[in-house]
Amino acid sequence: MQEFTVTKGATSVILPISIYDSSSVIGAKLAGLVFNSASLTAYYNRTGAAGAATVITLVTATKGTWVSSGFIAVDGTNMPGDYELHVPDAVIATGVDTVLLQLKGAADMVPINIKILLTALDLQTAASTVDENAAATLNIQTSVGGAAGSWGKATTDTLADTNELQSDDVPGLIATAQADLDIITDSDGVILGAAGVDKILDEVNTGAAHNVNNSLGQQIRETRNVLVITSDDCPASGSHTTSNVILATGEPTGNVAFVHDRLSITEGTNAGLNAIITGYNGTTKTVTITPAFPVPCDDTSLYEIGPGIVHAQTNEGGYDNGFVYISPSGSTTAQVGVDGTIAVPIDDGSFANALAIAVEKKLSKFDVAPGASITLAASLDNKIMDGALYTLALGGQSISNTLIQNCRNITGIATGAAQPAFVQCGMGNVTLPPSNGFVVGFSGTFTLGSVGIYSYGECQGFNITGNPVFDFNSLGGATLLLVKWGNGIQLNNMAAGDVLNITGDGDIVIDATCSNATVNIEGIYTVTNSGTNMTINQEARLDLTAIQNTVWDAILTGALHNVPTSAGSRLRMISEVVQVDSAVDDPGAAATTSTFNTDLTEVDDFWNDALIVFTSGALSGQARPILDFAQTNGVITVSEVLTSVPADNVTFTIVSDHIHPVTQIAEGVLATQLTESYAADGVAPTLTQAVMLIQQKVGDFAIVGTTLTVFELDGTTVAATYTLNSDTAPTTTTRTT
């Protein structure tokens, strides 16, 4: 939380703000933002306001020149990540004491929360006068200071970095203190002077003396205790470098202390600089920092260590979302706070280090990168292992109450008093305690390790060389539940008391090693039972072959199979197109390539113009139009001869297509009277027009001089005229009309 104190009703206020980079592991600021950066938004809320927060539509601005809702970088090169926010006057208008603002949404941006304390007193100009002679100006924000450990020194230290102020209302408390000082009087009634104020500010702020609940002294002291973990002078002894700072001898001895905290130099060499602590040696009292300081610190440097901003979004010190991170080529050390983070994952061959860090940080989750291969060398109880495309060798360890998910292949032996669970994993050859699974693929032998319930849902076999094997290990009291199982399964070593409950589809092979056990089946399965005295309850089993036969043997009727567009309805309609299936019935061998007897009994001409298709024998596949059908002996005559004589009892199908034989087509063309018609000169004629003109030109015409006139059927109407090239010996004619 970044906090500012502003006078109520002030105008043209510009706030300096800092924005941090969420992708940085060292707490770097985020440069390059502009008023219209993608997804960047700003909102404010005045205390007591009803409804949703109010949007601030950011606009561009000139640095140092206020414009309502302006947003501009201070200096992208020399001060990256620092910006000016030009606060609209309405935000800080009179009427409330506090306003909250938030900027968020841009890529890699840590959301920035701003708290504005609105006071009736202008802290930059207010003065407390002793009297007209003293005229001592009191300005709390510029005059605080004093000896180390004093109230004033604590206030200075507390306000040293407003960007890190995250708790109590220090500026508000100071404003209260200034107002109180304005009315404090000595015993003689004279207003307290500047020297008295300094004495108050130089008061050593201790728990023994300043412990009145909710008092200014107590809250200032507690605020500093939150924001400053420790502070001291850098010792003269020791080898300071630009990236290593020696702390005072009284600092903690453990190597975990201070990692990812913030180191600030408040006085002396490197004063005003901040860095993130990436490592700490409790023996030498040396912190390793990033970024490095421009020059080494020395005995003039006064340091403070406060809570860092690195990974503030998760509060897990780099272990984002509470995970210890593992990769195929990570760190082989176990430095808490550094190794196993998302930035420095643990090497998959050093999983023991990942476990050690999890214990130290009280974490229970592991994120495994693709390609990693982990072998357990210690128990993995009460944990979560997640990731993608990694492999896991169980190593004979306990995985009690552990969730393992998204593992490409799990192998080996595991134990566990409480059931582990597997989600979206692949199983090779494993031996497991009673367990649960969901969407698991089995490719090897799954051995049940102990008596209990094994429950797996929506799983299937992936063994390309055969069915996966479930080996009951002759336990005599194990129950395997396979719900919505897909593909085949083989059962080995089932004994009395062992039970398989399975639903789904596939095939079940019961090995000869099984005896006196129970298999309950629900679904579409084929069963091969080589076991002895097996109880197989199949009442709910659907026999796939029987289902297939029932479907294909069903008689299609309009009464039962009439749902529009259904398979039954469409098959029925197709069957109605195929009129009949029959056979040649010509035992006397009287058949020819065009005529043969059949067992059909319909009336004469019933099958005329239909299509007969032979479905067996030497003529199988041949089709011919039926020229004639006679009821006596069911004689069929085809219009086009067959390639051979149909043998007795060969089968055929008659399709209801109406097909005219060639003779009918010829008769229809040649015996049909033409309708008189003539094409105009220069226009292509129809067949009828061409034939008519030819006929009339041959039989009904007159020649006068060089003109040949063709008449229509009535002998008078002109159908066409031609011009001859000679009236005595013409050799050519040309149509003119």
Image (cartoon, rainbow, N blue to C red):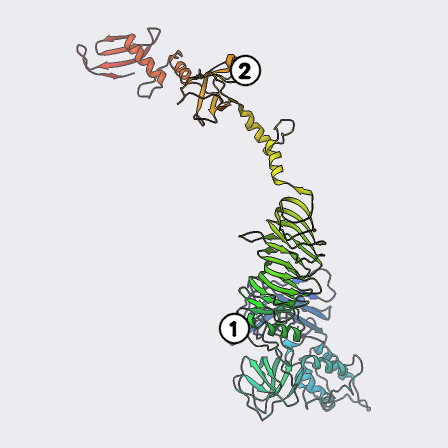
Work out whether residue 145 can be spotted.
yes
Residue count near mark 2 (Cα–Cα under 10 Å), binned few <14, some 14–19, many ≥20 = few
**What amino acid does circle 1 point to?**
Gly
Give how far across and how far down residue 423 sits, in percent.
63, 58
Would residue 88 be seen by someone viewing this image from the given angle?
Answer: no
Q: Residue furthest bottom?
A: 237
The residue positioned farthest toward the top in the image shown: 715
- The total number of labels drawn is 2
Tell me where residue 55 appears, x and y as whole percent: 64, 62
Q: Which residue is mark 1?
A: 76
For this view, does 734 lie left or right of residue 669?
Answer: left
* Residue 564 picture location, percent across and down: 61, 31
Q: Nearer the viewer, residue 49 or 425?
A: 425
Residue most extreme to the right? 187
Q: Position of residue 460 (x, y in %)?
A: 60, 52
Q: Nearer the viewer, residue 447 or 373?
A: 447
Identify the amino acid type marked 2.
Glu
SS at circle 2: loop
Instruction: Quadrant for the N terminus, please.
Output: bottom right
Residue 404 vs 140, above or below: the answer is above
* Mark 1 neighbour density, 10 Å: few (under 14) some (14–19) many (20 or more): some
Q: Which residue is mark 2?
A: 602
Classify mark 1: helix, strand or loop: loop
Quadrant where the C terminus sits is top left
Query: Disc 1 and disc 2: Cα gap in Å?
Result: 99 Å
The quadrant holding residue 45 is bottom right
Q: Report the residue at 40% width, 19% height from top.
A: 641
Q: Is residue 379 above or below residue 672?
A: below
